[in-house]
Image (cartoon, rainbow, N blue to C red):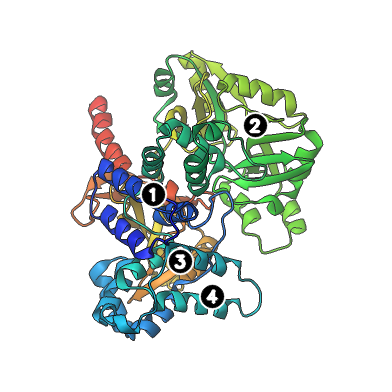
Amino acid sequence: MTNDLSEKLYKDLAELCEEIESTTKRLVIVDLIAQFLSKVASEEIAPSVRMIVGKTFPEWSPKTLDISWRTIQKILKDITRASDEEMLQAFSEKGDLGDMARLLMLRKDLSKQTMLLPKPLTILEVYNSYQNISEIKGGGSKKKKENILLSLLSRANPLETKYIIKNLIGEMRHGASLGLMEEAIAKATEVPLEIIKRAHMLIGDLGEVVEKAFLKGPQNLKDVKPIPFHPIRPMLAQSVENVGEALKVHGGETSLEYKMDGARVQIHIHSGEVRIFSRRLTEVTTSLPDIVQQVGNNIRCKEAIIEGEVIAVSNDARPLSFQNLMKRFRRIKRIEEIINEIPVKLYLFDIIYLDGKLLIDQPYHERRGILSEVSGEIELVPQLVTSDLERAQKFFKDSRKKGHEGLMAKKVESKYTPGRRGKKWLKIKETESLDLVIVGADWGYGRRVKWLSDYYLAARNEQSGELQIIGKTFKGFTDEEFEDTTQRLKQLKTREEGRTVRAKPEIVVETVFDEIQKSPKYKAGYALRFARIKRIRDDKDVEEIDSIEKVKQLYEKQFKTKAKSI
């Protein structure tokens, strides 16, 4: 890597992103990024990585730029002098906000007014502008943020504008996933990929990983340990149809646990302080003061990172639905009132770090044993280790009778692999479902006329990064949820056409359905038949939604299931 004093221009990064967008070949993308990273100065390398993947700040310390689409739209209109009709037409042509902005700039021929432009933007100038915007708080903050963004976009050429907008709204869609970025960093630094992946798991910020890899080498990354109160990406699971399949996948024996309809939490304990983070790595400590107190009174250690599940419970301790729990995190009332109104219970299921020792490389059954020794009076998630199909099926039925979703199956010898969705952890539920994101909605009819209540649901094309619609539904919500979702979608609105509102993809929903069909109506080629929303998943990020590939797999599985029943 070079360390010359000449600053890298932001247009070089924008051109790299454009090259990445033009190909679907994995190795080509990795090569392009690796070559780019090898040519930037030391101080530019972390900002470059974060802006390429669309994470302008470390994942473990998320800071929102808090700039609405309306603000961006207003600034673009000021710069390009475009009318509302022209903006709508540009979006209709491109279907992407970044491409829309680029097209508006090109149509106004601003790119040819070189004599009027100040010196070109650099990578650090753009990144520091994002930093400055994020740090503005208090009175007059909206206007101050607008001024910084106006100054930034006034100096940007059309292609730069496209990727600045994409960074601001968090939708890069060019195919450079976190996994590909890990590969590119490994190639550029000649540090083994597994070491890069492990460091990313623990640090959570690829920008910091690449800095350490370039400046300090493999050994420094090998010795990485969790940082107190910086959450680690959680280990993920794949779905299987039944306990028999789980036993088969895990070689005949597995650790079964109740799958609860609650919020997964990561609990950090350090120097007598307890903080709690959601699976999206967002701190939720203030929403769970009763859990903080319970952990502080029970966990027998000085320092730890522990995973658990928080569920809402009734007065007789029976589990309530996930939506009841979400009221804790989207509270309107004071937390003191919510504690009595929505009591919760914590169950623990894993421990990642304890008193200076990282435990992710130890087998699951050993981690569970360690957890039982430090958990005090806090219950662990009910568990059955078995290779017996009949006992496993009975355990599944017991879980359902007690009001839980189903079971988790965890390979007894499995290591903890954060961020990886593999077969070492499996989830078993009675009904098949998909985690999808709402990308738009129509105003309802009749009783629903006052709500945005007919939702466009999208899955992710993993090749292109594009969100592709696979169905619509107005089924599954209560009136309260219709009202709440309407208000949220109005805040996320990017444009409105007649009765249809298009929105920034943020609201993730678990969706059940009767069948998946082939459909020429949707670009994805598939459509859900009789889709209905089971619940809003505010604990999940849009990056965690299911893929078109999974939709295809479920479509093909339908025929195998039907064939067996004939």
Residue 2 placement (x, y as % from top left): 41, 50
Whether 283 is drawn above or below 155: the answer is: above
The kind of residue on which mark 4 rests is Lys
Residue 560 placement (x, y as % from top left): 25, 29
Residue furthest front in the image:
4
Identify the mark nearer the N-term, 3 or 4. Answer: 3
Crowd band around label 1 with a 10 angstrom C-alpha radius: few (<14), some (14–19), many (20+): many
**Can you tell which of label 1 and label 2 is closer to the viewer?**
1
Residue 503 visible in the shown view = no
Q: Are marks 2 and 4 in contact (CB under 8 Å)?
A: no
Whether 186 is drawn above or below 449: the answer is: above
Identify the mark nearer the N-term, 3 or 2. Answer: 3
Image quadrant occupied by the C terminus: top left
The kind of residue on which mark 1 rests is Leu
The residue under label 4 is 145
Identify the mark nearer the N-term, 2 or 4. Answer: 4
Residue 550 visible in the shown view = yes
Residue shown at 66% from the left, 20% from the top? 369
**Can you tell which of label 1 and label 4 is closer to the viewer?**
1
The CA span between labels 2 and 4 is 40 Å
Identify the mark nearer the N-term, 1 or 2. Answer: 1
Question: Which of the two residues, 4 or 160, is positioned nearer the viewer here?
Answer: 4
Image disc number at residue 353: 2
The residue under label 1 is 37
Image disc number at residue 126: 3
